[in-house]
Image (cartoon, grey):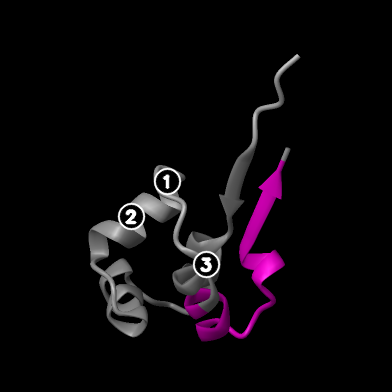
Amino acid sequence: MATREKVTNSVERYRKKAGMTQEELGEAVDVTRQTIISIEKGNYVPSVLLALKISRYFKVPLEEAFQYEA
């Protein structure tokens, strides 16, 4: 039986809590607004570097911003 692996995230929750737009977060971590949209929708799993930048920006542990589900 195959296990479906997946990465979920809390980026939208942290972004809204900070009162930021997707554009502002994109600028802060050096990606486009479209990339932030894709991450928030779960259509794109960011690189480790980008995930670290986002979690560091919000001052939360990586495991709180991104969750691995097996």
Measuring from the top left, give residue 54's x and y in whole percent.
49, 75
Q: Which quadrant holds the C terminus? A: top right
Measure how far apart labels 1 and 2 are at the Cα level.
6 Å
Q: Quadrant of the N terminus?
A: top right
- Between 29 and 1, the one lying in front of the other is 1
Q: Which residue is labeled 3 in the image?
A: 48
Give the alpha-carbon distance from disc 3 to disc 2, as whole Å: 17 Å
Residue 63: x and y, percent? 70, 65
Q: Secondary structure at mark 2?
A: helix
Q: Is residue 64 magenta?
A: yes
Q: Tag 1: residue type?
A: Lys
Q: Nearer the viewer, mark 3 or mark 2?
A: 3
* Labels 3 & 2 near each other (Cβ < 8 A): no
Q: Position of residue 40 (x, y in %)?
A: 44, 53
| Quarter of the figure with residue 60 | bottom right
Q: Which residue is mark 2?
A: 37
Residue identified by numbered label 1: 41
Q: Amino acid at mark 3?
A: Val
Instruction: Bin the neighbour count of mark 1 within 10 Å (Cα to Cα): few under 14, some 14-19, many 20 and up.
Output: some
